[in-house]
Image (cartoon, rainbow, N blue to C red):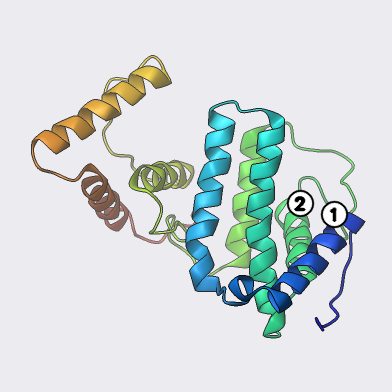
Amino acid sequence: MADQHSLSGSSATAELLDKMAQLREHCPWMRALTHASLVEYLLEEAYEVAETIEEGHPDAELQGELGDVLLQVVLHARLAEERGAFTFDDVARGLSAKMVRRNPHVFRPDGSLQDSFPATVEEIEQKWDAVKRAERPGHRNAFDGIPAALPALARAQKSLDRAARAGLELPGGVPVPESEDELGNLLLAVVRSARDNGMDAERALRAAVSRYQRGQSGPSDHAPS
């Protein structure tokens, strides 16, 4: 029989965690899953959520896709609980504490609301970055924490966002497209040129981002982690 585990929050969450415990006990396929074997599913489900949002699918479809992402979180938490590492409740409590800690412009340290709130996004970003720097003093580089496994375009965008906020030099740009449609056509043309010349656009951009990060890798007092 499945071991007892702490349940909190809504009855729907409790039921979901209980069903997962039963599946892990009685379903051979579920029982064979590992953190490593679930990685591909986690990435796939995240991309499906993005596609649902970007293509404007109905809310019912978005709800279902978010459920699939939640399934991955519940599965990973259950696997961790079975080996005595942490529980789903631990994940939720840790996230709640993190939201309080990283948003001092909204919450006091005890979790209650502040009396007033910042007026601009810039103020919020400054507070956010300051808290993250204090949490991880060993992470001094602006690009720390950006996953190397991100698709090259996402990694490039994230790197440039971090660099701009840290006051680092940005690489040269091209004439600004008037719309995302124009930008998409420009990127597609670049990929077509790479293909016609026997080059891999993804690999080329990944290498360019790495070169840029190395060139800007000096310690930065403004670097978020």
Q: Secondary structure at mark 1?
A: loop
Task: Decide if residue 96 is in sight here.
Answer: yes
Find disc 1 in the rendering and name its residue. Answer: 108
In the picture shown, does residue 212 fall above or below 57? below
Q: Which mark is residue 168?
A: none
Q: Residues within 10 Å of mark 2 (few under 14, many from 20)?
A: some
- Snapshot quadrant of residue 65: top right
Q: CA distance from mark 2 to mark 1?
A: 6 Å
Q: Is residue 161 left or right of residue 185?
A: right
Residue 10: x and y, percent?
Answer: 90, 56
Q: Residue furthest left?
A: 197
Q: Nearer the viewer, residue 182 or 138?
A: 182
Residue 35: x and y, percent?
Answer: 55, 72
In the picture shown, does residue 81 fall above or below 170? below
Q: Nearer the viewer, residue 22 or 106?
A: 22
Task: Decide if residue 86 is in sight here.
Answer: no
Find disc 2 in the rendering and name its residue. Answer: 104
- Snapshot quadrant of residue 158: top left
Q: Residue at position x 42%, y 56% from top?
A: 143
Instruction: Name the quarter where the N terminus is drawn.
Output: bottom right
Residue 114: x and y, percent?
Answer: 87, 46
Q: Secondary structure at mark 2?
A: loop
Q: Nearer the viewer, residue 213 or 72?
A: 72
Q: Residue at position x 86%, y 80% from top?
A: 4
Question: What type is the residue that disc 2 sits on?
Answer: Pro
Q: Are marks 2 and 1 in contact (CB under 8 Å)?
A: yes
Residue 198: x and y, percent?
Answer: 9, 42
Q: Residues within 10 Å of mark 1 (few under 14, many from 20)?
A: some
Q: Nearer the viewer, residue 177 or 132?
A: 177
Q: Residue at position x 54%, y 57% from top?
A: 42
Question: What type is the residue that disc 1 sits on?
Answer: Arg
